[in-house]
Image: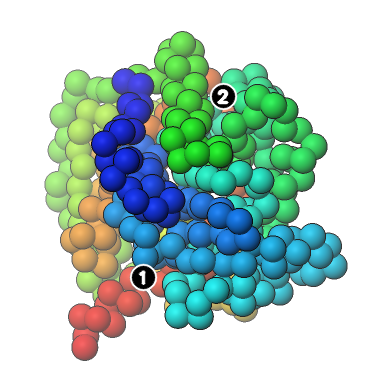
Amino acid sequence: MTMQNLWDDTIAASSVTPLALRAYTSRLIGGNKDMVLYGGGNTSLKTADTLYVKGTGADLGAVREEHFTALDLVQLRSLLNDAGMHDAELMNRVDACKLSPRSAKPSIETLLHAALPFAYVEHAHADAVLAVANVANCEERCAGVFGDLAPVVPYRHSGAALARACKEVFETRATTRTIGLILAFHGVVAFGNSARESYENLLRLVNLAEDWLQMRGAWALPETDEFASGTDRAESLRQAASSIAGFPLSLCRVSTQQTLAYARRPDIAEISQQGPPTPQHAIYTKRLPLIDGDIDVFARHYRSYLQDTLGSKLHDIDAAPRIALDPSFGLCAFGVNAHYAAVAAEIYLHDIAIISRASAHGNYRSASAKNIAQAELEYGGYEQRVRAKHSD
Ligand SMILES: [Zn+2]
């Protein structure tokens, strides 16, 4: 099932400004959950000396003109060229490039968008691309599948470090055929000089990945014809997880032939304990799922993971799992309420697809524990906000 081109000439023609057109193709990308999930991904437009980039927090699938933040492109680029400036300082300076102080905080990937010399830039966490790229031999695999259409950028933390790496790879490896970049263990970037070209370049890379996986026999997901049984077990895990969290967690159980097959894989302890396909997913799923039902051991490991990676920056992130896999029930997700439990479950279904497909052609890998922990800390915190709202 190749990803469809949803470009519509009539809707495109009714977009009266370049930014309205930018918002239109952003919604085409954001509306497809095989492209981005729950706040992931970002897009931009350049006109003369201005960069319009999606504000943080806006959902790409529903984004409108007013959700883009205008920034001084010349200033942004001079920040990138200042080799002496530290990454953290650089990110603080990005906000000062906003043309209107009242506009939303610009996307964390603003500098990446500024660094690329195209009017339109798209960034997504497309499942098919991650399923090709997230393997131990990522560079070699991507070179074989995408070649100079999309050179691979080694994993860097979102923000200044990733922007600089993209700039360097683009400047040293792009050819006249290049239409994007593969971000190892993170996602994909595509670009073009018109809204349509840029959108279609992203589709082309995603479809190339899917076609390759199909050809390798790595696309179809394993299924079992056996039944689930563990309703009581899922509920007792929810109670144990709630007591570790210190507040009641909601449960979303997904017992399908696919989740059961995944939880029963003989290599589950290996492939499920590498980390999420892209750091953003960890906001909802945490870095690793629980696989053996021992919540106390999970909590102990989770606390030492936070301590080892974040140290004194550690805040009040609870140590309960958000995803549990079990041969009896398949998948269950926990959340601060029923909505977020369902979100975590949905994201993990995408992770199952990506990890299974990657494991069908290589050894699945993710970004390092330290990188995932940073993402959990930087983007996280929504659960505290949800709970604070309820206790108002
Ligand atoms: Zn991203």
Task: Give coordinates of residue 261: x percent, y percent.
Answer: 30, 28
Q: Is residue 218 above or below residue 322?
A: above
> Label 2 to label 1, Cα distance in Å?
34 Å
Q: Nearer the viewer, mark 2 or mark 1?
A: 1
* Viewer-proximal residue among 19 and 153: 19
- Quadrant of the snapshot with the N terminus: top left
Determine which residue is flagged by label 2.
Answer: 362
Neighbours of disc 2 within 10 Å: few (<14), some (14-19), many (20+): some
Query: Given the image, on which type of amino acid does mark 2 rest?
Result: Gly
Quadrant in which residue 38 is drawn: bottom left
Task: Give coordinates of residue 369: x percent, y percent.
Answer: 59, 54
Determine which residue is flagged by label 1.
Answer: 382
Counting residues from the start of the chain, the first of labels 2 and 1 encountered is 2
Q: Are marks 2 and 1 in contact (CB under 8 Å)?
A: no
Q: Residue sitting at 56 percent across and 46 percent down?
A: 119
Q: Residue sitting at 29 percent across and 54 percent down?
A: 62
- Taking the image as shown, residue 165 lies to the left or right of residue 380, namely right
Task: Give coordinates of residue 180: x percent, y percent.
Answer: 59, 35
Q: Is mark 1 within 8 Å of ligand 1?
A: no
